Image (cartoon, rainbow, N blue to C red):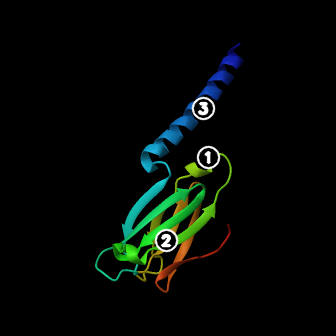
Amino acid sequence: CGMGIALLLILLGQTVFGWASITLDDWRYGRSRTFQTDAYVGHEQTHQPSHFVVFNNRGRIEVLELPGNDATHARLYLGPQYTGVNADLIPATLQFVDPHHTRQPDMLIKLPNTSIIFHNANGTFQLQNSSF
């Protein structure tokens, strides 16, 4: 009887944990999952930072760049395509890293369990290795 109760508590705990995780992501990133940030990446023609929005579009991770916060020069970068149940609920965030101190940082898309690097070259970002 004790083992049955323990098993029931474990299954109930997993269900509650899964629901709480999705609910917290809903509060943090919304539906569809979106994240925004500003950064100076060397693509600006003005003194304003570029604005970036990363979103999960039905399982496809996409990054929108507004160079110098100018929508007329918008660029779209495609990330991985996820499939399966709740693929549209995977959150993604951005981080900009400049390991070579060039003042043109690379774009790092951070996903659960993985990161994808887009190299900053020639005024745009290019996927460093296309593994998806």
Q: Is residue 17 left or right of residue 6?
A: left
Packing grade of label 1 (10 A; few <14, some 14-19, many >=20) is few
Q: Secondary structure at mark 3?
A: helix
Residue that numbered label 3 is attached to: 15
Of the 4 image quadrants, the one containing the C terminus is bottom right
Quick check: can you spot residue 93? no
Q: Which amino acid, by three-letter code, is at mark 2?
A: Met
Residue that numbered label 2 is attached to: 107
- Which residue is at a point 44% across and 63% down the rendered structure image? 53
Among numbered discs 1 and 2, the one appearing first in the sequence:
1
54 or 6, nearer to the observer: 54
Q: Secondary structure at mark 1?
A: loop
Quick check: can you spot residue 34? yes
Number of numbered discs overlaid on the protein picture: 3
Horizontal and vertical percent for residue 111? Answer: 56, 58
75 or 9, nearer to the observer: 75
Horizontal and vertical percent for residue 103? Answer: 40, 81
75 or 37, nearer to the observer: 75
